[in-house]
Image (cartoon, rainbow, N blue to C red):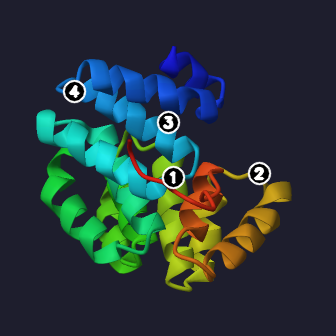
Amino acid sequence: RAALAIQANDFQSAIPLAERAVETSPTDAGFRSLLGNAYFGAGRFASAEVAYRDSLSILSNQPQVILKLALVQIAQGKNDEAVAFLQAAGNVLDPSDYGLALALSGRAAEAIAVLEPAARAVNADAQVRQNLALAHALIGDWNAARTIAAQDVPADQLDARIQQWMGFAKPTRASDQVAALTGIAPAAADPGQP
């Protein structure tokens, strides 16, 4: 039921359901990551961090949980922790996700080094190219950002994308970029896990 509530973006209902699932089966990594997803969707980044860490302590090879843990750390301004964690897990992450998370953590130049070869690969998709374009935008290389973005963004939407990234490049709070990418606003208060 918690998973269905998350799919419906009903995080307030999902949280108690996921908490009960974890209480019933505390060693189930899937329930712990489900709880993390419920907290993340509700903007409770500190609680999500704890749930994701718990899930990874039970089952370490979960690329999407690793990525989400890094994102909630970045949203809390824990960039150095996120980078250390990403670098330790870099070999299990998709280069597109890894590069994007590095860029969001303030390591856009390192992100470009990860994303460029992935974007040049035969099977490269629009996501990796757009993440590369965003990384260039975050270091202020607007010409490269525009050129790369133009490969996938229709010409009549390109200026709007660049304008969006210009605002995105200068966040006011640590959570602004993660919130803008995920559509998740940080909660006003995070009471933690029960």
Query: Crowding at label 4, few (<14), some or many (≥20) Cα neighbours within 10 Å?
Result: some
Image quadrant holding the C terminus, namely top left
Residue annotated with mark 1:
44
- What is the CA distance from the residue labelled 2 to the residue labelled 4? 48 Å
Callout 4 amino acid? Pro
Marks 2/3: CA distance? 34 Å
The reply to whether residue 60 is visible in this rendering is no
The residue pinned by badge 2 equals: 154
Secondary element type, mark 1: loop
Disc 4 vs disc 3: which is toward the camera? Answer: 4
Task: Name the side, left or right, on which 135 lies relative to 152.
Answer: left
- The residue positioned farthest toward the front in the image shown: 194
Q: Are marks 1 and 4 in contact (CB under 8 Å)?
A: no
- Of marks 4 and 3, which one's residue comes earlier in the chain? 4
The correct choice, above or below, for 168 with respect to 153 in the image is below
Q: How far apart are the alpha carbons under marks 2 and 1?
A: 35 Å
* Residue 127 place in picture, x, y as percent: 51, 47
Query: Badge 3: few (under 14), some or many (20 or more) residues near its Cα, within 10 Å?
Result: many
Instruction: Please provide percent x and percent y for residue 129.
Output: 50, 55
